[in-house]
Image (cartoon, coloured by chain):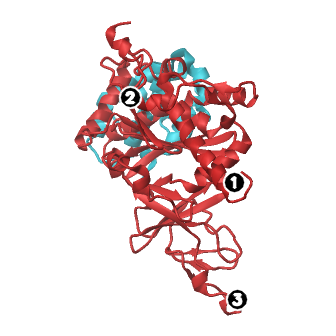
Chain colours: A red, B cyan
Amino acid sequence: MNAQAAQFQSTPGPDELALGTGPIPAGPYYRPEYFDLEREAVFKRTWLQVGHLCELAEPGSFIVRSLEFANASILVTHGTDGKIRAFHNVCTHRGTQLVAEEGGRRSSFSCRYHAWNFGYDGKLRAAPDFDRFYVDKAQCGLPEVAVDVCARLIFVNLDKSPAQGLREYLGPLAAQLETLHVARATQFSEYTYEIDANWKLTYDNFQENYHLRFIHPRSGAAAGGPENPFGYPENYALHGLHRTQRIWSNPAPLIKPFQGYAFGKAAEAMMADGLADCPNGSEYYALFPNFFILGSPMTPFSHCVMPLGAGRSRGVIRLYWVGPDDSASKRFAREFQMATALDVHAEDRAVIEAGHRGLSSGALEHIHFQSQEVLCRHFFHAVNNMVESYQAERKAAGGVA
Amino acid sequence: MSATGGLLPSGFEPLEPFVESWAIDGAANRAHRRLVSNEAQRIAFFNAAKDLLPAGLAYLDRKPLEQFDEKEQRLMNLFLSLGHVAQAVEIQGDDEPRHALGRQHMKITRASADLP
């Protein structure tokens, strides 16, 4: 191993040392009772990415998102006043789920049960024979959900009064996100998967490169090189609850001929659209709790890992594009880029599930993270600190922690 | 060739035998076709199409996508399928059958090429 390779032996930095080096308890990665705590302590009081403004391009457009961890369905609207709002997708009459579609355009929302009709501002506009009720229309608006936007990404927070606004929550990363491709994107390609694994096990897979050479020996052949066989990142940084890594620039990636031609087409499109100059193009952002976005304008993907239960999750991966396909070459390049990313992600699923099966047997008390898995270690502590704070809060309030 | 002739723009006749299998609308359908294809089909298509791709894209780039006639749209769809098949032939190689086991769980729900 040469001198350059030695640098990838990663001497732990001060941030890493503050996280300790000891083993990590296994229970939080599979136990249903721990997941129940996470639902309350993390997911019901944290900003969660649920969409992108290009899905709400026109005033009058809306999207609906399922947040299974809360048994909730969220309606996000773009009002004719230009405002983005979010509501629980629940008719205030008797609780019927209001909108069945995943998205579209409408002038208002009518409940199919008794035809209560709501506007984009969530207000009850009309209800048949309303004089017979014992309540004012003004009290019957849709329950609001906190919503905000950064880099055209839409975030919601189920906490009725979030402890922090979105910008404060994201801190200095908010400004960095605004420099990315996604902040100018007008459309996206998307693929999804469901997986029998805890959301943290799933998420962790995508914040360490230790596995790349074993799980992606062919699709990830360009990730490592002689001086950095594992393709470890150049740098890690911790940002409160969030964390980033700077992708290593492989000076001599192994690229196959067709792949090289297709990537060339993607690069041409990127240059033509003026997207090549991206100051944070090598940064890979892990936004707490469950969202990734890669700064690279060549592979501008995001990945959201949504928990469906203690042992089941859904991944949503999007590649964001600026402008429509306006040539055959660009259309080909985008399809190829999607197929390339999908091939890599498809390789992770089985081994993550095997990890969940192994852990949920209860055979292990602890798991271990090496120095190049520091982001996984940081993630565990971020979640666990919130869970412990929540337990203390409940105890102080006289509840069962 | 005569039975299937005239399906593609002039100059791309060598790809006519692949139209039925690979000139497919919809990215999810193209990914599915890769899943259910066999190695011989993939290699034959890849070998026939890869060298025609640069000329084909140059030809198609001369016209706005929305003005494609049926022949041009078939050629476009062939090249989009080639983007999937190239992963199998050039990258996955003999690992493709095992790779398909994981890939069958990935659902393409939106693709740039399918948008209006």
Inspect this view and state whether residue A340 appears.
no
Q: How crowded is mark 1: few (under 14 residues within 10 Å), some or many (20 or more)?
A: few
Chain on which label 2 sits: B
Where disc 1 sits, the SS reads: helix
The residue wearing badge 3 is A133
Classify residue A338 as left or right of residue A97: left
**Direction front: furthest residue:** A396
Name the residue at 75% across, 24% down: A363
Classify residue B62 as left or right of residue A400: left
Disc on res. A360: none
Q: Nearer the viewer, residue A230 or A241?
A: A241
**Direction bottom: furthest residue:** A131
Q: Answer whether labels 3 and 2 touch (C-beta < 8 Å).
A: no
Q: Answer whether labels 1 and 2 touch (C-beta < 8 Å).
A: no
The percent coordinates of residue A64 (x first, y second) are 56, 60
Name the residue at 42% across, 14% down: A229
Chain on which label 1 sits: A
Disc on res. A395: 1
**Amino acid type assigned to the residue bearing label 1 in the image:** Lys
Q: Nearer the viewer, mark 3 or mark 1?
A: 1
Are discs 3 and 2 located on one and the same chain? no
